[in-house]
């Protein structure tokens, strides 16, 4: 909504000043619309890490980093985590509101009927080395889905976009579990549509054709909560990548593959894997007794060591997802009798020290969701190398909801950032003999 206010940019180099409209969202900071800056002044803005730039308009997810608040379509994450399952959360993100019982049933039915992947997909897996990182396999296999579903690739057709969204949400657990089975040399497990989304995934991960797998309700609920908490997180690096890839008109499977590739990095989705590796590293050097030494390294300006699972670009308060994940962590460890698990004890000791240490307090560095989600996943029996795949499976719905929102916008344009060029200006190529 346009406000009656304007922003004026003035220049000391003689360029005439330029006025910009200011828009107000329903909540959050106002934004200054600088789109006409270049036309009016011949200048660009410079904001490489998007520290002050709203890259799009969105109605899906809102974060108040100072309050530690996360809303999906207006609903607080704390209420969603307690009252909804993952597929209801998917419905909410994709459609804008909570499903009623009939809508929930219909949505579940649609997802269930798309859980299998084309049998030919197994050949893609066989092309990878057995020791390939499962995220490498996932990037490749999700991208490959574009080659299978030509019937739903007209991105201007809302029905096609919906079918692609359902296919992606439905097939991700199957592909993630296949990536795991491939790495462990066990046969792929077909989905079982009488199980819930999360129970089906656990069965495809941990079941074998030799023996029936009985999902444990507490563990299934824990996995479902991991999925809910990771389902969307507004314009983070991977979501922005999906939007940028999608802005060119690329098909949704290719866009989600680009999102998965971005998620892989340790500063983003790879953090839970990195966090567990960090805990294992401290454990190997002596555990709790070595925390002081480790924290000193983290605080040393000359070292590159970071406390993984701490800090966030947006949250400058406790990440609300971390509180919920901490609760789940206790529940799972209790169910499995792992309360004295050394990784958990170490994590708790590290958390306590970091929350009291002035280095972290003054920089507003609090635990983020990944600090606990790695411990929960380890307790569920998920190997560390699979953690980011689970994150990708959860986030697929957020990516596709954001992609769909962008494509539905009639004013949508291809994303084309500009640059501050500091390289060589035009110069002549000398013949090879004269160089
Ligand atoms: N350990 C130690 N120091 C830190 C950490 C950390 N985890 N995070 C930030 N700092 C320091 C940083 O060195 C800087 O100090 P100084 O002002 O003295 O130079 C200050 O805090 C501000 O940091 P920044 O790098 O400007 O913060 P950022 O917003 O660019 O980075 C972050 C955010 C998440 C990349 C970073 O906090 C980090 O690398 N954390 C560890 C990785 C991690 O847990 N990532 C998961 C994020 S949550 C999952 C998701 O949403 O994807």
Image: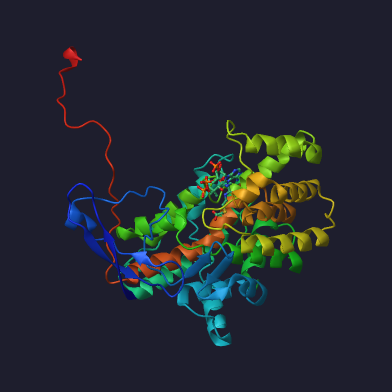
Vertically, is 171 above or below 92? above
Comparing 274 with 66, the one in front is 66
Q: In the drawing, does residue 129 fall left or right of residue 40? A: right
Q: Which residue lies most toward the top here?
A: 433
> Where residue 191 sits in the image (x, y, percent)?
60, 65
Classify the position of the C terminus by image quarter: top left
> Where residue 416 sits in the image (x, y, percent)?
28, 53
Query: What residue appears at the point 30 percent right and 51 percent down from the top-left corner?
Result: 45
> Where residue 237 sits in the image (x, y, percent)?
45, 53
Classify the position of the N terminus by image quarter: bottom left
Comparing 431 with 206, the one in front is 431
User: Can the viewer see residue 399 in this picture?
Assistant: yes
Comparing 109 with 367, the one in front is 367
> Where residue 71 sits in the image (x, y, percent)?
54, 71
Query: What residue appears at the point 47 percent right and 67 percent down from the top-left corner?
Result: 167
Query: What residue appears at the point 20 percent right and 46 percent down from the top-left corner?
Result: 13
Query: What residue appears at the point 45 percent right and 60 percent down from the top-left corner?
Result: 235
Vertically, is 397 above or below 267? below
| Quadrant housing residue 89 | bottom right
User: Can the viewer see residue 181 in this picture?
Assistant: no
Q: In the drawing, does residue 363 fall left or right of residue 408? A: right
| Quadrant housing residue 276 | top right
| Quadrant housing residue 305 | top right
């Amino acid at each position: 909504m346009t406000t009656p206010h304007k922003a004026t940019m003035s220049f000391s180099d003689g360029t005439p000043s330029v006025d910009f409209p200011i828009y107000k969202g329903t909540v959050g900071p106002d934004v200054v619309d600088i789109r006409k800056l270049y036309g009016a002044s011949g200048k660009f803005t410079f904001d490489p890490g998007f520290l002050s730039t709203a890259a799009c308009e969105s109605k899906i997810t809102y974060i108040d980093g100072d309050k530690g608040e996360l809303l999906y379509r207006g609903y607080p994450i704390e209420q969603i985590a307690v009252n909804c399952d993952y597929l209801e959360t998917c419905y909410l993100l994709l459609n804008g509101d909570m499903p009623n019982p009939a809508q929930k049933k219909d949505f579940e039915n649609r997802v269930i009927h798309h859980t299998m992947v084309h049998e030919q997909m197994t050949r893609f897996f066989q092309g990878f080395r057995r020791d390939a990182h499962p995220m490498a396999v996932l990037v490749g296999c999700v991208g490959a889905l574009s080659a299978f579903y030509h019937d739903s690739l007209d991105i201007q057709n809302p029905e096609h976009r919906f079918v692609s969204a359902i296919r992606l949400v439905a097939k991700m657990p199957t592909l993630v579990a296949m990536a795991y089975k491939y790495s462990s040399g066990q046969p792929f497990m077909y989905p079982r549509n009488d199980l819930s989304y999360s129970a089906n995934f656990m069965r495809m991960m941990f079941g074998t054709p030799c023996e029936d797998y009985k999902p444990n309700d507490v563990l299934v609920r824990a996995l479902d909560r991991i999925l809910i908490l990771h389902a969307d997180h507004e314009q983070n690096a991977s979501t922005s990548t999906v939007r940028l890839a999608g802005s060119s008109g690329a098909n949704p499977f290719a866009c989600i593959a680009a999102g998965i590739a971005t998620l892989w990095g340790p500063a983003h989705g790879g953090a839970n894997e990195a966090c567990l590796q960090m805990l294992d590293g401290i454990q190997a050097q002596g555990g709790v007794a070595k925390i002081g030494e480790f924290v000193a390294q983290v605080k040393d300006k000359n070292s590159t060591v970071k406390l993984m699972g701490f800090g966030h670009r947006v949250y400058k308060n406790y990440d609300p997802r971390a509180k919920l994940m901490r609760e789940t962590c206790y529940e799972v460890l209790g169910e499995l009798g792992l309360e004295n698990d050394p990784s958990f004890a170490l994590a708790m000791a590290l958390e306590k020290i970091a929350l009291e240490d002035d280095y972290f307090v003054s920089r507003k560095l609090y635990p983020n969701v990944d600090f606990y989600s790695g411990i929960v996943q380890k307790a569920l029996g998920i190997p560390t190398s699979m953690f980011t795949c689970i994150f990708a499976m959860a986030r697929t719905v957020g990516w596709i909801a954001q992609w769909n929102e962008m494509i539905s916008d009639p004013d949508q344009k291809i994303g084309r950032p500009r640059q501050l060029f500091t390289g060589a200006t035009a110069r002549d190529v000398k013949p090879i003999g004269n160089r």
